[in-house]
Image: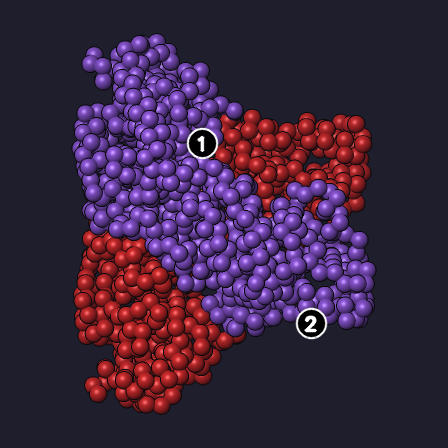
Chain colours: A purple, B red
Amino acid sequence: MEITQKTLAYLKSLTAETVSNAKSGHTGSALGASSIMLALFHDHLFFDPKDTKLINRDRLVMSAGHTSALYYSLLHLFGYDISIEDLKKFRQLGSKTPGHPEINATPGVEVSTGPLGQGVANAVGLAIAESMMEAKFNEKKFEMFNNYTYCYAGDGCLMEGVAVEACSLAGTLKLNKLILLYDNNEITIDGKRDLACSENTALKFEAMGWNVIEVKDGNDYYKCSSAIKKAKKSDKPTIIIFKTTIGIGTKCEGSEKSHAMPLSAEDLAEFKTSLGVEGSFYVPDDVYDFCKSALTKNYLESARYKKQYEAYAKAYPEKYLELAMHFKEPKINFNKILKSLNKTQVISGRDMGHEAINLISKDVPNFVGGTADVAPSTKAVLDDYDYYSPSNRLGKNIHFGIREHAMGAISNGIALYTNIFVFDSTFMGFSNYMTPAIRMSAMMHLPVLSIFTHDSINIGEDGPSHQPIEQISALRQIVGLNVFRPTNSAELVAGLKIFFETKTPTALILSKSKLENNKNVSLEDALKGGYIIYKTKEKPMIEIIATGSEIVLATQIAKKLESKSVGVKVTSMPCEKLFDAQEKKHKSSVLGGTKLRVVIEASNDTVWYKYLTSKDMLVNVTNYQTSGKGSEVYAHAGFDADLITKNILKKLKLN
Amino acid sequence: MEITQKTLAYLKSLTAETVSNAKSGHTGSALGASSIMLALFHDHLFFDPKDTKLINRDRLVMSAGHTSALYYSLLHLFGYDISIEDLKKFRQLGSKTPGHPEINATPGVEVSTGPLGQGVANAVGLAIAESMMEAKFNEKKFEMFNNYTYCYAGDGCLMEGVAVEACSLAGTLKLNKLILLYDNNEITIDGKRDLACSENTALKFEAMGWNVIEVKDGNDYYKCSSAIKKAKKSDKPTIIIFKTTIGIGTKCEGSEKSHAMPLSAEDLAEFKTSLGVEGSFYVPDDVYDFCKSALTKNYLESARYKKQYEAYAKAYPEKYLELAMHFKEPKINFNKILKSLNKTQVISGRDMGHEAINLISKDVPNFVGGTADVAPSTKAVLDDYDYYSPSNRLGKNIHFGIREHAMGAISNGIALYTNIFVFDSTFMGFSNYMTPAIRMSAMMHLPVLSIFTHDSINIGEDGPSHQPIEQISALRQIVGLNVFRPTNSAELVAGLKIFFETKTPTALILSKSKLENNKNVSLEDALKGGYIIYKTKEKPMIEIIATGSEIVLATQIAKKLESKSVGVKVTSMPCEKLFDAQEKKHKSSVLGGTKLRVVIEASNDTVWYKYLTSKDMLVNVTNYQTSGKGSEVYAHAGFDADLITKNILKKLKLN
């Protein structure tokens, strides 16, 4: 057998055996995509298994993450730290070869994928990042950045809105180093793709400004390889539509049955015989050698690149230093930023946010981002920088368009590139369009800062569809996401400090309404997630916990109670997750010792029950409100200082 | 002035004045779309303001809901119960004219819209429903259903993934009575549309199987009207691309500044002068008469239709009865269904769900739905019925494709048509792709049943991206959505009973794993949302609250404790919202009287703190888990009967 065909045969066998051995996983597309992916790895992909973080490596996103058995088999063949034993542990607890690719589990995996469509948007983000780095750092004879971003996607991925949103933006942005490998096997779980999707993909992508290449026989290694070669020369993003056969060579070839079906021992044996391969989990030396030939070429290029990197330091020392900053912890003087923010006494959350990100951007060159077409409203704009566009790759602000979900997933992609800090932004009411992407950023622990403004019912006139009441809860519940709802500069800066220092994905929930910026609050206090912001001289009988705009209200209530000689303390808790993580000593110094605890937040979040007993009081929003003036809607929903004061006194039988 | 132009002028004036008077709202597109919408209302739309629920009325969805001032002005001119006084109360608390259209606020409004893109998918759902009704009920000389669905959408709507997903499906399904009125003013909030979206919309829709009509002057009433006339004859869904001018005639014409800018008193006066109109909030009689002429035509048709409806009763009595069922409460023998489900002792949640919806569908002819390409997995299929397709409009199962968000919003549209009960379904892990649509179904109170299977970490091998832990919380927090996570048939049936009887949108969270179907549980118990499912003879010292699969675990723990002579009661709480709504008597008979309360749920939901004090115990999932065998992942996360038993005994110092 010719060596390419032989390698393909052993790759298929290894892939099918990996799934079959686990008795779990997806055989269909893993076999169907084998020619495409082998051609990519052998003939095109620039990678260095010994330096998986090489900054100019090509990026590969397996958007159809269920094709993982093929992916891991390729990583094994091409020198990554994945052994045959690892393949035998496919999908087992604690293995390097989980069901869907995970960046923290497997060397070589660039992006955690699984939920369909998002990988395509991640790839768009990676390509945006590459183009930014290229524009910023490339010099004559020093192509510091020129890598390609490949994205493997199936019929499912391309039906997902998040993928189409991202592709529309990619076409607009002319991301010519983005290559979408579309495994068009025309089969989905329910049966033929046409049952739910008869669209003309080629034409659709052409309409979105893409270069379209069609490969009628996507099972042919050489045709796959030559299409990829062509794609690399395009001045637009390219989709290669490979007509493939799902489960090729197996009993269920061409049928949806092959999608998630591990082959039985018998069927596997038959399949292997038809491929002409021998052994179990066996790869002949000449197949390894064939793969090594690609590796050798890549190792040479990797070595050359490293030399170039060193030479760059001498040729362009300033640029080199800036590039090096991407790999260092940013140095940000947060106290100085706080001082500057504290110059304004009464300010809205969104205005505070705007000022803060602009101050930070002076210290962090690798900080970029944008909004979903609401820049004038959320004010998440870096004023000193241009917008990123095909003619200006140096712009740091991105017009994501009215595409919240893609914005989230593209931000993840940018952040994945190489230590770029990213912000994205929309109204809090639409944060639910992007929670699937935020969940993935939390799972991957990416430095993405989501700036959500217009944070509650007091936005008023736009009505219930725009008044977020459940959205904050959906964010707070995301494991590994920090959520800050600040009421003053110190809290805002605390959220940003933790974000930049720990690179934990963070959501800032900012008000459209004015806040009283209490400049007596120290950064140290705010960094505890919860602290006493107001305390009467009288010994507190009542404690109020609140966040964001509701601190304004809580303070009013406290003053009213104070005037009746009732002692009160008000705790501001911008990040309850952070507060919970404090030492017991701090927590008990803040909470407790009173007769009544009241939580006030204009949301429907049940997290507050954590701090309440049945004897306490929760002032929240448990119904959709109506359209009306912000202050009226707020009061109508019960957020009224007189009313709450009255209810507190009643509860304590003090009225 | 010619009367059409005069009407247009007064419509524009009324619209601008409405926004200007409120000092809040959106002037830009409301003016830009006035020719399109006046042409639609006057020349095409079939409606009866005196019978806003007329079943064969044309449906209009204002997807770009911020264009509401124009919409309300038209409703006023065309005989709906919206007065000039109502227009003066635009965006005020409790008015009939809220910021964005809301079905419960305004007579004539078909769909609550605002979050961009969703309205387009709602319209696709309405068109699907119409085609189903047409196929089911039309007979020779009795066109009981033939209405059009119009959807007004802007540049923003069409960038949203949910809209593109829905349009792709609409093309596949050849929904020829769907007409998308695309107000292509080329301006979004950030500036020119091209900044973020340079795609060729015409070509994109052609690729998706649509009929495309372009109107170069969308400010020309006659050209708009004639395009709509053409669209009505298409055998495909039609998009009419109207090139319009945002804020036409005002100072900020053609600029993004006009989007959300109420005109100042001075600018309004100038604008009115340029239009040649008089008075304030004034409409001359001949303008009212012009609108009335369309009304008269519509009233005649409405009367004719009603006669036809009566005649249909005689000509096709059986079909008439079935049609009448759409407007009656369905009669479902839930006890019988429960009895049938109870025949199986050990069964997975998804299998129970499958059997239940099939039994119900025998009693409810107006029950349709489908999955996002996971029918074999979630088993949400009506076995006795075909799939809906262009060649079979009688099918009751829908291939939504891999488009969760659109599935949710399309389901809302179907449910909006005329008392159709809808189910949709995907994996619980992807429920977050569709929460924006579920939120709207909750706001509109629509009979949409979401069937989410593979409900927790014990799905195992697919790994954390597919293991839902936060998703249940995001659903439970949605105001007006019932969430049921049943552990047995009685609980499942209870959830369905409430769904069909109250038409409250409901999410069923079903396991892939096997449950022990306790047939001793009565429907009455389950209908309380929480009840004691297991109790030892010994007086309970410990109470365990659990849901779904965790009841299996809780019962194991109870038996272990029992064997150590420790009294226990286990409370199953499939719907905590429902339990909370019970009388105090029931609640105190279920909860309390023990030394330790333990809640067990394989989720990260903070709702359980509602029932816990700091002395109690919460066994939940606060971290992403890994890929592995379901039972191993479950145990690894702490869901192990021995471990939990040991911890309980330790807590009570009984070990």
Q: A505 or B481: nearer the eye?
A: A505
Residue B363 spot, x, y in % from top left = 45, 51
For residue A68, the mark is none
Q: Categorize mark 2 by other alpha carbons within 10 Å: few (<14), some (14-19), many (20+).
A: some
Q: Look at the picture and state if B559 lies above or below B260.
A: above
Badge 2 sits on which subunit?
A: A
Residue at 70% x, 50% y is A611
Dot 1: what SS?
A: loop
Q: Are marks 1 and 2 in contact (CB under 8 Å)?
A: no
Q: Which residue is more in the foreground, B146 or A624?
A: A624
Residue B652 location (% of width, % of height) = 79, 34
For residue B378, which quarter of the picture? top left
Q: Which residue is mark 2?
A: A642
Residue A288: quadrant of the picture: top left
Label 1: how many residues lie within 10 Å, few (<14), some (14-19) or many (20+)?
many
Q: Position of residue A30 (x, y in %)?
A: 33, 27
Q: Dot 1 corresponds to which residue?
A: A102
Q: Judge whether residue B360 can be spotted in this image.
A: no
